[in-house]
Image (cartoon, coloured by chain):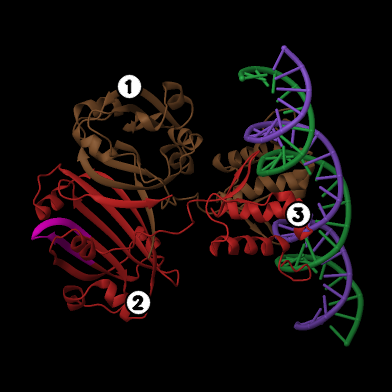
Chain colours: A brown, B red, C green, D purple
Amino acid sequence: MIDKTSPMPLYFQIEEAIKQKIDKGEWEAETMIPSEREFSLNYEVSRMTVRQAINNLVNDGYLTRRKGKGTFVSAKKIEQKLLGLTSFTEDMKSRGYKPASRLISFQKTTAENRLAKALEIEEGQEIYEIKRVRLANDIPMAFETTYVPVDLLELNESHIKEGSLYSEVENAGFVIDYATQSLEASISREAESEILEITKGAAVLLIKRQTYLTTGRPLELVHSVYRGDRYKFMIDMKR
Amino acid sequence: MIDKTSPMPLYFQIEEAIKQKIDKGEWEAETMIPSEREFSLNYEVSRMTVRQAINNLVNDGYLTRRKGKGTFVSAKKIEQKLLGLTSFTEDMKSRGYKPASRLISFQKTTAENRLAKALEIEEGQEIYEIKRVRLANDIPMAFETTYVPVDLLELNESHIKEGSLYSEVENAGFVIDYATQSLEASISREAESEILEITKGAAVLLIKRQTYLTTGRPLELVHSVYRGDRYKFMIDMKR
DNA sequence: TTTTCTGACTGGTATAGACAACTAGTCATA
DNA sequence: TATGACTAGTTGTCTATACCAGTCAGAAAA
C-alpha cells in the first residue's frame, strides 16, 4: 500500500490512500478514521509523517480533527471557494473530477483590432492562439480559446500539453494580479456542438476572461464555451 | 518577542510576529523572510516549530515557499476582495440603467423538502414566496423567485413594492454575512418566455443565490432566470 | 576567457520520542 | 445515587537530528 522505495513522498502516498477511501465511499462523512498512532504502526512510518498527510487533507477540507476524540471525514466535499482565480484544472480537481485537456490547435497569428485592444498591443502584432477542449472524467466540458501576446512569453506546444500556461507564466517570473470575467448564456453553434458532443442549439455558458499581471499588462484573453447541462459556475461572496 | 511560558503555542506566536511585520509593511511583497534555520536560532525553538508557523501562513496565502531559494511574502495580499453582494437594483444602476421591479405574486406557502433543507428549517414550515420581474429601462431582464422563512421576518406586499428586501432585513437588526451563487446556462421554458418576452428555447442564465446572516442562518433562497441576450454577469477577481 | 565543479545556502522529507490537553468511560467512595 | 479520581485513548505541541533536493555564486579547471 505504501511504497518506501517510491520517489513519491510517504506523506503524499498516505494522503492518496486516505482520499481514495473517502472518494470510494468506504469512509463516509463523520466516520472516524484510524488514529495517527494506528496509521503510524500499520504503515511503519513516524507519527509526524502521518500528521503531515492528515494536515494536508484537513487543509483541503477532506478531514476534520477533534482533539481528544479523533479525526473524522468532513461532511461535504469542498464546494468551491471561487473567489480566487482558479484554473480549469484546479477547479475540476476541487470538485473531485479528473481534469484533462486536448489540444486542438496551437499557432501564431496576428491580432486584429478587437483582440489587440483587449491585450493592449498594436494591431497586427503576433499572438498565440491556443484552442483546447477541456475534459472532466473524459467528458468534454468546455471549448476554450486562449490568446497570449508572443512578446510576453515564449511558448511551444509541449508547454501547453505538459504543463499549464500559468506555471509557465510563473516560471517566467510574472505574477498574476487579477482578472475580469463575464458570463452569459447562449446557444451552441455548429462548430462547438461537434466538439462538445452536444446538439446544436443546446444551452451553453460563454465565459470571457481577461487576466492581468502585476505589471498591469494583460496576460491573456480567454473565450470559453461550457456545456450548459454539465457545468455550473459557483461563487462565494462576502459582503 | 517569543514567550516560552505563555500558554499560547510557540508556532502561533511566531505566526503573529511574522504577520505583524507584513501588515506593518516592514516586509513588503516579494521580500525574502529569514530562513527557517535563522528563525530557529533567533527564537531558540526547533526548526519544525518554525515550519509549522510558516506552513500556516503559506496556507493562508501570506507567504510563498521556493525550494532552494527561500520563503517570500506573497504578492496577492490575502485581501478578501469582495465583489460585494449587490442587489439587482444596485447592479443595474451601476450599469447606467433605470431599474424597476414588477411584483407578480406574494404569498405564504409551506416549504417542501428541498426548500426546507436549503433554508435549514423543518419541512412544512411557513415561507414567503415572492415572484418578481426585474426590468431595466422598462425591458424585462429577469424573472426572480425569492423564498424567505416567515419566522425570520415579518413581511407584507408594501415592503417589497416600496422598499427592498435587504433594507427590511437591516431594519430587523440582521446583518448579511455572505452568499453562495451558482450560475448555469439553460433554455427558457414556456412560463418564463412569456414573462420575459422571449421565444421559448432561447438562452437564459439561471442564477441561484443563497444568502446567509451573520448568525449563520440562511436568509433567503433566490432563483433567477435572466435573459441570455440582454444580461451579462461580470466578476472581478483578485488572486 | 569560458566552462565545470564544489560548497554553502535554501526549503522538503522523515524519524523517534516526550509531554500536554482533552474526551469518555470505569470504578471506588461518600 | 452522585461525585470525583483514575485510566486509556485521542490530537496538540515541541525538540533534536538526519539526510535529500534545488539554487546560486565563486573557485578551480579547461
Q: CA distance from mark 1 to mark 3?
A: 51 Å
- Please, is residue A24 above or below residue B171 in the view? above
User: Which image quarter holds the C terminus of chain A?
Assistant: bottom left
D9 or B33: which is nearer to us?
B33
Q: Position of residue B203 (x, y in %)?
A: 18, 43
Residue B10 visible (yes or no): yes
Give me the residue at 31% from left, 37% from top. Answer: A221
A158 or A19: which is nearer to us?
A158
Q: Position of residue A182 (x, y in %)?
A: 27, 47
Q: Position of residue B209 (x, y in %)?
A: 32, 58
Q: Is B188 on the left-hand or right-hand side of B66? A: left
Give me the residue at 59% from left, 64% from top. Answer: B20
Query: Which residue is under mark 1?
Result: A107
User: Which image quarter holds the N terminus of chain A?
Assistant: top right
Query: Which residue is under mark 3?
Result: B40
Q: In this rendering, which labeled residue sits more in front, label 2 or label 3?
A: 3
Q: Position of residue B76 (x, y in %)?
A: 47, 52
Q: Quadrant of residue A140?
A: top left
Check disc 3 and give the amino acid type: Ser
Mark 1 residue element: strand
Mark 3 residue crowding within 10 angstroms, few (<14) / some (14–19) / many (20+): some
Mark 2 residue element: helix
